[in-house]
Image (cartoon, helix red, strand yellow):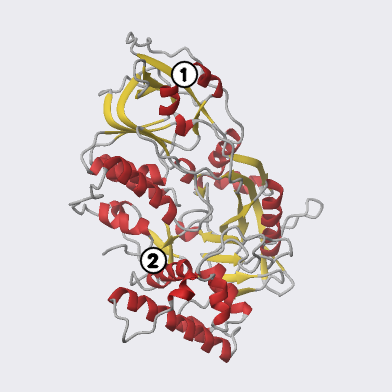
Amino acid sequence: MIDLPPYPPLDPSNYDLIVVGTGVSESVFAAAASSSGSSVLHLDPNPFYGSHFASLSLPDLTSFLHSNSVSPPPPPSSPPLPPSNNHDFISVDLVNRSLYSSVEISSFESEILEEHSRRFNVDLCGPRVVFCADESINLMLKSGANNYVEFKSIDASFVGDSSGELRNVPDSRAAIFKDKSLTLLEKNQLMKFFKLVQSHLASSTENDDTTTVKISEEDMESPFVDFLTKMRLPPKIKSIILYAIAMLDYDQDNTETCRHLLKTKEGIDRLALYITSVGRFSNALGALIYPIYGQGELPQAFCRRAAVKGCIYVLRMPITALLLDKETGGYKGVKLATGQEIFSQKLILDPCVTIGLESLSSLTDQENETISVLVPKALINKEKVARGICVIRGSVKADVSNALIVYPPKSLFPEQLTAIRVLQLGSGLAVCPADMHVLYLSTLCDNDDQGIKALLSAMSNLVRLPDPKNQQSDSVVENDTCEAKPILLWRALYVQQLVKGEFGGTISSMPSPDGNLNYNEIVESALKLYEQLMGSEELFKEETSVENTTEENDDGVDIED
């Protein structure tokens, strides 16, 4: 348990809303609720903002993963503050569940990394980027949170395979014609397909069925992979569209293992996000951008906006129990780790917070119903996401610093069931020292061994894994394609459980980070909860712009309407 500083009692002790955890969903909701005039207390048991979306130094990341890979014992029941004299409430103890397993952290250049360890800002749930047309960007603009964070472009996107070759993703007209790996026929086929998609999107926007070509309703309901085949796109082009532009996870050609067979209408929506992201901001190089200092800056931006609107923030403050009304069984408040009792109308919790099973037997049916969203349940969906982080000397692609790499299913080995995504970030984003890069890897999996195997395969394809018997100081070595391979300095492997949010009447739980590349579903969960708890009230209505607090950076992307 975190050693608590000597906090004075919080005043006031009554709020409209208590939010526990400063992840993206929780921070968006807290900012929206504060903007609407609600009184909000925002707590986090960690000493940093962001919860599972935080960006941390190497020592802090190591400590967090190890401490959260096993469920900690319940906190001691002797608070420093005297217990409440109010006998109208019962106290139900809370416990934390672990989201992480199979944590393995290795350092191969300890002296160098220790010297620079605090110069890293490493994401807990990477790889993750922001599409320029992402809903999170729209919310930042509407709320004014964009004034507290600055972005830079992802320079390029590639598709990889087992040979080690990285091929450019032809995601625009110029990129298609510059791509030397495509034949003239393939270029024409891809251009024809993109023109059809753009024509369909234009007709949907303009509601004009006479002057533009639209995709038929029958095709829109068919599997996207079948529609691409109908368009006579070769397998190579289909793979690029499915996994490097639409960003799908499962093998769409294998109906036995594919858990989500995408319909064409969903595929077109994903392409629309990509297409509308390209060129939205004049100084963005492509569709994807990333926050300087790490993705932990996004929840912090919304937290700062909430603080401007009166939200009260307290870090290093766990909650240890729920307070329920003795007569009605309804929710009344929480007990802090300091022993103080705080009351609110509604409560939103981090996905790690749950109820101890031993507490349930003594509760009434009404009390059990009140806390039902926090009761641990047997996992119906056992899907997990395996994540990896590498600190490397050099770059996986010459003259490219910030890049996204996608390995489609079966591209590395026959048993690879899901796509593997890799994001390389450099020192220009203030995430690592100069001459180094950080690689983030992720893939969906059914079990830990499957996920770790896939990540190690991608790592060995991209970087030189150190040989303890033959350590070399060279920054790069040659691979089979004569492309320089960077040297691995530090590595973390871990598997994260996927927990869905549950929305209750007075107590709700937010989801864990998902396995997606962007934030759309994460933000959507906050918007759904806001609509449920706050009704039809508009988010961030009548917000006024605030002075930009970020320093100017010539290479940064200006996020403006």
Q: Number of numbered discs present?
A: 2
Residue 441 placement (x, y as % from top left): 59, 56
Left or right, residue 60 beside residue 461: left
Q: Residue at x 61, y 36 (%)?
A: 69
The amino acid type found where label 1 is placed reads: Leu
Query: Observer-nearest residue: 423 or 329?
Result: 329
Q: Residue at x 61, y 83 (%)?
A: 181
Give the structural element (helix, strand or loop) at label 1: loop
Does residue 386 sit above or below 74 in this rendering?
A: below
Give the structural element (helix, strand or loop) at label 2: loop
Does residue 66 sit above or below 258 in this rendering?
A: above
Q: Which mark is residue 363?
A: 1
Quadrant containing the C terminus is bottom left
Residue 157, can we see it? no
Residue 101, can we see it? yes
Q: Residue at x 44, y 31 (%)?
A: 45
- From the viewer's perspective, is the residue at label 2 or at label 1 nearer? 1
- Quarter of the rendering containing residue 300: top left
Left or right, residue 473 beside residue 441: right
Q: Residue at x 43, y 82 (%)?
A: 196
The amino acid type found where label 2 is placed reads: Asp
Residue 445 placement (x, y as % from top left): 64, 52
How crowded pointer 1 is (Cα within 10 Å; few <14, some 14-19, many 20+) is rated as: few
Does residue 493 sit above or below 561 in this rendering?
A: above
Query: Observer-nearest residue: 503 or 93?
Result: 503
